[in-house]
Amino acid sequence: MMGEMEHQPIPNWAIHRRFYRWVLGFAKTPLAPIILFVIAFVEAFMPFVPPDALLIPMCLEKRSKSPFIALIAVFGSVAGAMVGFFVIAGLIQGGAEWILSEAKVAELTEQFSEYGIMFVFIAALTVVPFFALTTVAGVANLDFTQFIFVCFAGRSLRYGLEAGLIMWLGDRAKEFIEKRFNILSILVCVLAIVFVYGVSKWLY
């Protein structure tokens, strides 16, 4: 899929695909780590090109540095998540209270708070829009320490899995990631949640 998009002619109206190809163009340049950090940062608080689009070709280009490349994406994403949690959430909360009433926002916030940390972890690891959950987490005033922890955990698992697969399989990993990585990430997410739930039940 990714390879096909790189070689197909792009219609004039497909601005998103032109931007996607422009991002891919940085994969083999010295600016690639900076661009990856910026993309991961922005994508954590607003709709944007997923960091995976640049991370994968960067790792394929320099397989031995895949863990370092994954870390760049992780730190960029977590930094952006803090913008979503504090800044974007602050901007949205005032508007939400004006539209729904302060009491309704408080009710929705209380409902989200119960499983909010788990939702953030799922979004950090899977294809669920991460930017939406970082903002909602801020509106719901989730515990910031727990929020940062699950952001680090989820993003580290996602980008670490991609980098690890590329180190292990090389070019073959690209097709696997494009076709099956979402299923793998959901499976890992479910196993992680079951593990944490089981440990908490055992401890408490």
Image: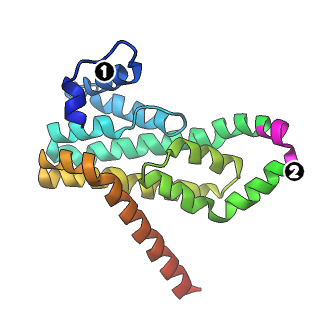
* 36 shown above or below 8: below
Q: Residue 146 carries which label?
A: none
Residue 177 position within the rendered picture, expressed as x and y whole percent measured from the top left: 25, 49
Q: How crowded is mark 2: few (under 14 residues within 10 Å), some or many (20 or more)?
A: few
Q: Which residue lies furthest to the top in this view?
A: 12
Please say if the residues under marks 2 and 1 sit with CB atoms less than 8 Å apart: no
Horizontal placement of 196 versus 12: left or right? right
Give the prevailing secondary structure in the magenta stretch.
helix
Is residue 91 rendered to the left or right of residue 23? right
The percent coordinates of residue 46 (x first, y second) are 54, 34
Label 1 sits on residue: 22
Identify the magenta region.
96-102
Compared to residue 199, the image places residue 133 above or below, namely above
The residue pinned by badge 2 equals 103
Q: Quadrant of the C terminus?
A: bottom right
Where is residue 43 shown, x and y percent of the image? 47, 36
**Res 24 quadrant in image:** top left
Q: Position of residue 145 (x, y in %)?
A: 59, 58
Of 147 and 116, the residue lying toward us:
116
Q: In which quarter of the image is residue 144?
A: bottom right
* Dot 2 or dot 1, earlier in sequence: 1
| Residue that appears at 35% across and 33% down | 36
Calculate the distance from the C-alpha at mark 2 to the C-alpha at mark 1: 45 Å
- The residue positioned 24% from the left and 35% from the top of the image is 2
Count the labels in the image.
2
Judge whether 98 appears above or below 15 on screen: below
Q: Amino acid under label 2?
A: Ala
Image quadrant in which the N terminus is located: top left
Relative side of 144 to 155, left or right: right
Dot 1 alpha-carbon crowd within 10 angstroms: few under 14, some 14 to 19, many 20 or more: few
* Amino acid residing under circle 1: Trp
